[in-house]
Amino acid sequence: MKILVINSGSSSIKFQLFKMSNNASLANGLVEQIGEKMAHAEIRFHDDSGHEFQITEDQTIKNHKEGLEVVNSLLIESGIIKDLTCLDGIGHRVVHGGAHLSKPIIIDDQVISEIRRLIPLAPLHNAAHLDGILSSLEQCPNVPQVVVFDTAFHSTMPQHAFMYALPYDLYEEHQVRKYGFHGTSHHYVAKEASKFLNLDYDKMNAISLHLGNGASACAIKEGKSVDTSMGLTPLEGLVMGTRSGDMDPAILPYLAKMKDMDIHDLDTMLNKESGLKGICGNNDMRIVGEMAKTGDEKAELAIKMFTYRVKKYIGAYLAILGNLDCLIFTGGIGENDIDVRRRSCLGLEHLGIIIDNDLNNQYAKGPIEISAKESAIKVVAIPTNEELEIAAQVKALI
Ligand code: ADP
């Protein structure tokens, strides 16, 4: 069984092809700068003896429909499949499923109109996903196509956790509530952690920290999400690459008055000019780490703020979970940044979280345990694989 996973952005399509008998990735690639003067497309794959190959194409690609045609021709050129129509299934990542789309679902007209209805809640993401989905349906009408939502894993949050203390009407009339994101990743790494640590998933309590450009924490009780740091949109919670995360909402009317900023200015500031970038000028944690090492005080401050916020969420989620089996780091930073992992756990010894600095001194190429023997709570770093999780959910459904 071969399943293609598609993640459509506003000007890009990322794709990965899986052979489901052994969960092997057969090829992955992307098309970017769709709609611009010159788009770039590439596919990476390997032969049976593990030799890596890459094909790239630069050409004008007007829209997602043309983008998928290029994906099709790259897959044919690689020799891995005859063409997209011979796939067993296609899985589409969709960021926002709202309150109703809480499980992977085969795409039909109703699903499409619900994703469209949710565009105001995730304007950049859902509109782009729809372009990709509609093009894919047109190109492969006979292949089963499934959508998997980033919000779905968090549908088990209790109401007292997902409500904001705002006028109740806003929840009823405008669905203003916490939805949470990165659900596919939190679910995947939690399942991997339970296998790695030999714990029964349905009985496991965990805190999952997905630390990438976007970052979120998730409290998992007996295998189910009971709280998460992102909210109505992926802006709330941890300090991120360019996003502020938590702050006093009154800052916004204050800035509107003092600096004459409008809604668009404020939105741009919060999503694109804040976080690590806002504090020290760079959003890439590798570069921020290098800057801090060479004595840049703002970079050092940015890392301190980032890890302090992570630590606060660990404490909060430990309080609501009661007992904790494991703490999971994932995402580009969580898997690779030894210093961020160390600093996030420093001082949590009294709560039963103790890192072994030697074990922590490695990248998580696969699952690794980084806690000391005497740590009551296991601390692990697990590489996330949202695409494989989507493919697995497509397979389960079809
Ligand atoms: P996205 O949210 O875009 O998927 P990723 O999960 O790929 O992001 O994470 C990107 C972040 O991971 C960047 O801040 C990058 O600097 C960081 N990162 C990747 N590799 C390393 C590394 N070896 N050390 C420190 N940070 C790293």
Image (cartoon, rainbow, N blue to C red):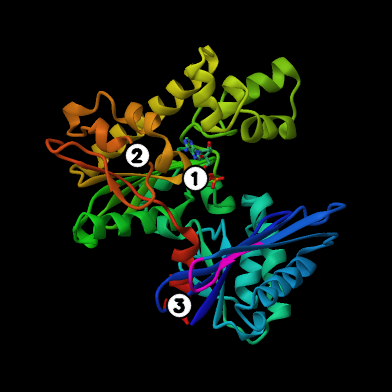
> On the rendered structure, is 193 left or right of 47?
left
Which disc number belongs to residue 362?
2
Please state the extent of the stretch shown in magenta in the rendering.
43-50
In space, the residues marked 2 and 1 are separated at their CA atoms by 48 Å
Which badge, 2 or 3, comes first in the chain's sequence? 2
Residue bearing mark 3? 395
Q: Secondary structure at mark 1?
A: helix
Q: Secondary structure at mark 3?
A: helix
Which badge, 2 or 1, comes first in the chain's sequence? 1
Which disc number belongs to residue 23?
none
Which of the two residues, 304 or 254, is positioned nearer the viewer here? 304
Q: Nearer the viewer, mark 2 or mark 1?
A: 2
In space, the residues marked 2 and 3 are separated at their CA atoms by 33 Å
* Point 40% across, 51% down: residue: 383
Q: Quadrant of residue 311?
A: top left
Place of residue 119 in the rendered image (x, y in percent of width and height, measured from the top left): 66, 56
